[in-house]
Image (cartoon, rainbow, N blue to C red):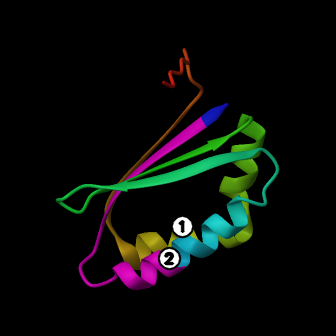
Amino acid sequence: MVIAVFRSTLRPGIEEEFIALGDRMLEIAEKMPGFISYKVYKTAEGERCSVIEFETREHIAAWRDLPEHVAAQQRGRERYYEKYSLFVSEPERESHFQL
């Protein structure tokens, strides 16, 4: 498994448009080979943290390089994001618990 953690802060007044594009990107990602899951969390201060999982580095690279996703990334830099950071890694250890 490969995990991408994308932390971002949006520019003011852009959230509705950003969410529409994000919904479209998720719709595409869910159909990509190797897609596992996507979650997004938002702090009270407005920072967002998105976590996306794919089966392999090749799968996440295919997602990264998909032309529509590349265009969305560019639009994000030009229009939506005040700041962001991206971390991509394979888990060193994994454990689960369920009552």
Quadrant location of residue 18? bottom left
Helix, strand or loop at label 2? It is helix
**Residue drawn at (74%, 35%) of the image:** 56
**What residue is disc 1 on?**
73
Position in image of residue 79 (x %, y %): 40, 79
- Give residue 75's mark: 2
Type of amino acid at the residue the image marks with label 2? Arg
Q: Is residue 40 above or below residue 78?
A: above
Mark 2 neighbour class, 10 Å CA radius: few under 14, some 14 to 19, many 20 or more: some
Residue 51 visible to an observer of this rendering: yes
For the record, the magenta segment spans: 3-20
Q: Nearer the viewer, residue 64 or 49?
A: 49
In the visual, does 18 lie left or right of 61?
A: left
Cβ atoms at labels 2 and 1 below 8 Å apart: yes
State the count of labels: 2
Residue 70 visible to an observer of this rendering: no
Type of amino acid at the residue the image marks with label 1? Gln
Return the residue found at the far front. 99
Q: Is residue 36 above or below residue 9?
A: above
